[in-house]
Structure formats: C-alpha cells, structure tokens
Image: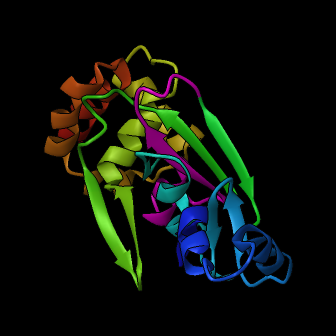
C-alpha cells in the first residue's frame, strides 16, 4: 500500500519520535521509500501500480502501454507516463523501477484513458489508440502516410494486422486535440487500411 510520510507520522504519533521510528522502519525493510515523502509497504508491488502516485496528474502511455497491449514486440522496463503543462521531462529511479514522464497537449491529456483496478491499487493507462497517438506526438513529423506506415512497421515494429484492429474514429477524434501532423496522417492511414 502506498503511504505518505504524513500518513506514517499519524500512525506512529504515540512514539516519542515518529520520524525516527519511520526511518528505522525503512532501514528494516518494513516500508520502502519510493520518492521523497512517499513509501510503499509491499516490496513486490509491480512498478506500473505506483506510476500515478509518483508524479501527476499522469497516466501510463507511450512505449510501456504499447508493449502492454502487444502493439510493439519489445518488453519495456521503464514505465512511461504522460503529463501535461509540466514543461519538462521527469525521470525517477526507484527501487521499484524507472519512471519517465513527458507532456502531451492539455486538450489531449484527458482523452482515451482507462482507470484500471488491480487488487487495492488503481492506475490510469491510455487506450491503445491514445498510447500510439501519444508516441507519435513525440516523434518528428513524417511527410506522408507511406512514411508513417514505414515508421510504424519498421521503427516501432507494429504489425499491420495490429494496426487494422485500432479504432480509426478514436484516432481521428484525438487528432484535433493534438494538432500534430503524425496524428492526422495516422487518422488517414487507419481509415485507408
């Protein structure tokens, strides 16, 4: 379970020095620091369950989400997340894994996100179409749909069969919020195939 320093200090208030007790608990592996002021009580919790608590508002997207959905064949070990209006990329190295955060447009941020529950944990993850749009948003624009298809199949290694499964209407709906050439071309490409 994720707990803040304040939560622990409240639980440990009957101790003479709650901060010292918390420090001893961390040294004895009774709780595990994630980032400043944030702890996890379960040492085996999967990293993706912590992503939204480390830095937010955010949701899991980009390469990590694409890998989860089987759109790209590579295993992705860094939990990649989308934020908005943060103006810079963030990276956190923790005992649970590496987490990166980067901006998408404010209008696009709330679109196409699923809230998922795993046990007592909740996290937000982009739908497959949104994760692909987020990824393409971060890449240099391509001149035409043929180049986009090459980028998707050769560089990102997305199978054409997987592209056909995507909902073109969702991508086209996201296009206005992104104002990105790659997303407009993806909309055209998915309608064509």
Relative height, residue 50 to residue 13 (above, below): above
Q: Residue at x 56, y 54 (%)?
A: 54
Question: Depth check: 162 or 124 in front?
Answer: 124
Could you say where residue 10 lies in the image, as x and y percent from the top left?
54, 73
Could you say where residue 40 lies in the image, as x and y percent from the top left?
62, 73
Q: Residue at x 45, y 17 (%)?
A: 141
Relative height, residue 29 to residue 77 (above, below): below
Question: Depth check: 72 or 63 in front?
Answer: 63
Question: Depth check: 61 or 146 in front?
Answer: 61
Could you say where residue 162 lies in the image, as x and y percent from the top left?
37, 57
Instruction: Kindly indicate the quadrant of the structure image that contains residue 85.
Output: top left
Relative height, residue 171 to residue 161 (above, below): above
On screen, residue 43 versus residue 114, left or right, reads: right
Q: Residue at x 41, y 86 (%)?
A: 119
**In magenta segment, residue 169:** no
**In magenta segment, residue 73:** yes
Q: Residue at x 40, y 32 (%)?
A: 84
Q: Which residues are magenta?
A: 63-88
Relative height, residue 131 to residue 18 (above, below): above
Q: Is residue 96 visible?
A: no
Quarter of the image with the C terminus is: top left
Instruction: Kindly indicate the quadrant of the structure image that contains residue 69.
Output: bottom left
Q: Is residue 9 visible?
A: yes
């Amino acid at each position: 379970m994720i707990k803040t320093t304040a939560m622990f200090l409240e639980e440990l208030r009957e101790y003479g020095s709650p901060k010292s007790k918390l420090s001893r608990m961390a040294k004895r592996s009774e709780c595990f620091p994630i980032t400043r002021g944030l702890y996890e009580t379960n040492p085996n919790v999967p990293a993706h369950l912590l992503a939204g608590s480390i830095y937010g508002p955010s949701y899991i997207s980009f390469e990590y989400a694409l890998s989860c959905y089987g759109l790209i064949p590579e295993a992705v070990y860094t939990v990649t997340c989308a934020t908005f209006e943060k103006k810079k990329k963030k990276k956190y190295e923790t005992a649970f894994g590496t987490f990166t955060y980067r901006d998408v447009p404010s209008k696009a941020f709330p679109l196409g996100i699923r809230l998922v529950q795993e046990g007592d944990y909740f996290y937000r993850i982009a739908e497959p179409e949104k994760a692909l749009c987020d990824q393409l948003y971060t890449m240099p624009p391509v001149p035409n749909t043929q180049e986009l298809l090459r980028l998707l199949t050769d560089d990102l290694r997305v199978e054409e069969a997987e592209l056909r499964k995507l909902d073109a209407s969702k991508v086209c709906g996201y296009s206005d919020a992104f104002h990105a050439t790659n997303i407009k071309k993806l909309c055209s490409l998915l309608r064509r195939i």
